[in-house]
Amino acid sequence: MKRCTLIMAGLLAVTAAAPVTAQTDELRQGVSIRMYDVGETIPVILPLVPGQTPNVSRFEERLDMDNPDFRPMRENFILIADGYIKAAQAGHYEFELTSDDGSQLWIEGSKIIDNDGLHGAQALPGGIDLEAGLHAYEIRYFNGPSDARLRLRWKAPGAQAFEVVPAEAYFCRAGEVRVTSPGVKQVIRPLTGGRPGDRAPLDGVHPSFTLTDIRPDDFRPRVGGMDMMPDGRLALCTWDPDGAVYLIENLGGRNGEARVKRIAAGLAEPLGLCVVDGDIYVLQKQELTRLIDHNGDDIIDEYQCVCSGWPVSPNFHEFAFGLVHAGDHFYANLAIAINPGGRSTWPQVPQRGSTIAISPNGTYEVVAHGLRTPNGIGFGVDGEIFLTDNQGDWLPVSKLLHLERGAFYGSRAVLGDEAADLDVTPPAAWLPQGEIGNSPSNPVRLDVGPYRNQMLHGDVTHGGLKRTFLEKVDGHYQGAVFRFSQGFEAGVNRTLWAGGGRYYVGGIGSTGNWGQEGKKRYGLQRLDFNSTPTFEMLAIRALENGLEIEFTTPLGSDVGWVPEQVRVEQYRYLPTADYGGPKLDTEQLQPKSTTVDAGRRKVFVEVDGIKTDRVVYVRLVGPWHDEDNRTLWSTEGWYTMNAIPRGRRGVARPAPQQPQNVLTAAQKAEGWTLLFDGRTLKNWHGYRRDNTDGWAVREGALCRVGPGGDIATDEEYENFELSLEWKVSPGGNSGIFFNVSEDGAYPWSSGPEMQVLDNERHYDGQNPLTSAGANYALYAPPFDASYPAGVYNQARLRVKDGHVEHWLNGEKIVEYDLWSDEWKARVAASKFASMPDYGRHHKGHIALQDHGDLVSFRNIMIRRLD
């Protein structure tokens, strides 16, 4: 149908907001500003995908901003301003929010002003009663492709006129870590929030694992390191002012049943712990320390320095991350110094940004260098040591690295121009910022179920655990990263494999945006493998002529043969002196074919044009399910293509032919009849015309192939169930109408519609009321259940005594009652109010719409429900 744009803007009044109890020594004056480049014009304020860092993060004195004040942002960005606003006295406060384009003012969690939508500079008022004191506020703002303007004024109690809220009324958190990154950020559109794991974070614990809270409520560790004692107790150090070490026992119980004993304290930022032959070693900022208990009471009597030779400055960022023990050496990572705001300090202390090996005699050597903030070291694939490093200058995004002696990993922060001629060891896996990583932590081996010889790593800001499959190509590791699990109480800083399918997950967080949004800043939980099968991509492998995707469980017999159901994109990164870096040379690659192997666990994706030095992004779309009808846990994988394996090729085979436009014996017994036989237009005629021009049979489908008009069934139906499959061309639009009378000029003048649409490319897909599967302009689906253009969607329309259900790809997405008071009210408020015949008929024809686009229908069948 035609475009229907809904814009809501207005004012709201909220009363009686109590002040918050923020400590003034935790605050500073000013407005905290974060700006996010969204890369395209959006129609309204949209939520950002969690776990992304802003492009710009800074403070402003007040909110009275015009075009130059937003620099370097110019267009198509979202701004979040938040903190506390101080009411000098109790009373009623009137606010006025001016913006170009949309904005909203929230105070104490209530929306006070809604000035959303695309528009020029306009001001809207709103009021609230405030007690004297500080009140949490947030302003959400977006700018489109033109001028930018944002101003907040108020009229305090007793004031006669509005004035710009003064600088002394604004407060925000002091000492926040204000991390930024370049590149386009992802937003959650109204119809992309309903499918966790598909272009959105997971929302729960991996089905193959059981998560258990084990810490007592009064034990709130910000975990810096963990390891198992020989007697089964957990040794743990904390990154907090106490710098403490604890022993935890009774770990098999539930929340509150673990027993915690503090055995040491006073350590300097301990971010690594390792147990060797029963002795506890802790990595401090400035030394590796052995903890010695002389009398057997567990309380540490001696802090023995093993090694303190590496150089350290007073800079807050010169962390020492660890800790692993291999052979007779300890391995740890040294972070570089950075300035407030995130840029690297110059000059640096020598040997920073390196992995060091510490020998039993207390000496150390640099094993590899060129790191920045390598908050992760651990054992992974093949028992090898792997590292993670965090985004910054010379790191366009975070990455996972294989520890190789003599390697230079790319950061020039320490060597400066002397590093320009060094060969850079590429990462085993890039971790695209905000998509699959943000602040990665330590790798850990994964040796259970189908995931054997893979590994996990946590993430402090993006949160959860990520899984990595690696393979060797030309003697070096490369591979794919997948989402694995969320659902933890905090951002994940340390993960420990305890053997037997058991893991311990330690959480952490800090001020600003270093920590997972909405989570605690501490945590300790147990994760146990429970053997429940989970359907997901197990591996992506590089081939000379494409990719091989392996799954954890066998595919359904009808799945995997449609190349349009595999999206492939590639891009590269270029390290520079700037903080982070965008994707470069992005290309969409169209698979030529997909071939399922005999065991139905592997799919060869034949695709031309894959290049080296690229991230190859794979997204599975459409009806992917396994033989037990499980759907995908997550649909995406990110493969780092350092090299293409020569001579390793996939073999394409023709897809098996599935019967179309026929009824099974069971369907016949249930009363189904075909409305389309796959060969002719029998059962159909042109709407209000004698021909079916513009419609033809193509490859067993009923297709709109040219201008001609709509078509309708020969028979009329009242109570019925209609089942069919449809696909549209890119940006395509069509519709399925029912209860249609041919008295009107068009089917939609009388018949309600189930929308047929390419949500991704058609502008109607941005509005839930006009998206695929909607009862057009009246009832919206809660999420996008459609498949992309070129892929068949399975639709079902059920009408019984005026009760209507819309089903799309196995999901009931719309439900309503014709002629109910609610229905009548919605019709009266829509464009259909001017169509006296709309929705009045209790029976009628079924019609398919000619909207000017190529559309195909097949397996069209119906059964009467009388």
Image (cartoon, grey):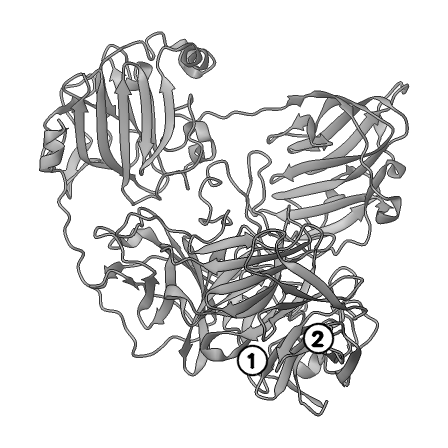
**Any part of residue 447 in sight:** yes
Tell which tag, 2 or 1, sits nearer the viewer: 2
For badge 2, the amino acid type reads Val
How far across and how far down the image is residue 96, in percent?
Answer: 76, 26
How far across and how far down the image is residue 830, in percent?
Answer: 45, 16
Residue 841, placed above or below residue 420 = above
Q: Which residue is mark 2?
A: 282
How far across and how far down the image is residue 117, in percent?
Answer: 60, 30
**Any part of residue 311 in sight:** no
Considering the numbered disc 2 on the image, is that residue within a helix, a strand or a loop?
A: strand
Query: Neighbour class for label 2 at 10 Å: few (<14), some, many (≥20)?
Result: many
Q: Is residue 176 left or right of residue 722?
A: right
Which of the 4 image quarters holds residue 443?
bottom right
The numbered mark, 2 or 1, whose residue comes first in the sequence reads 2
Seen at 28% across and 55% down, the residue is 563
Which of the 4 image quarters holds residue 244?
bottom right
Q: Is residue 245 left or right of residue 726?
A: right
Label at residue 403 = 1
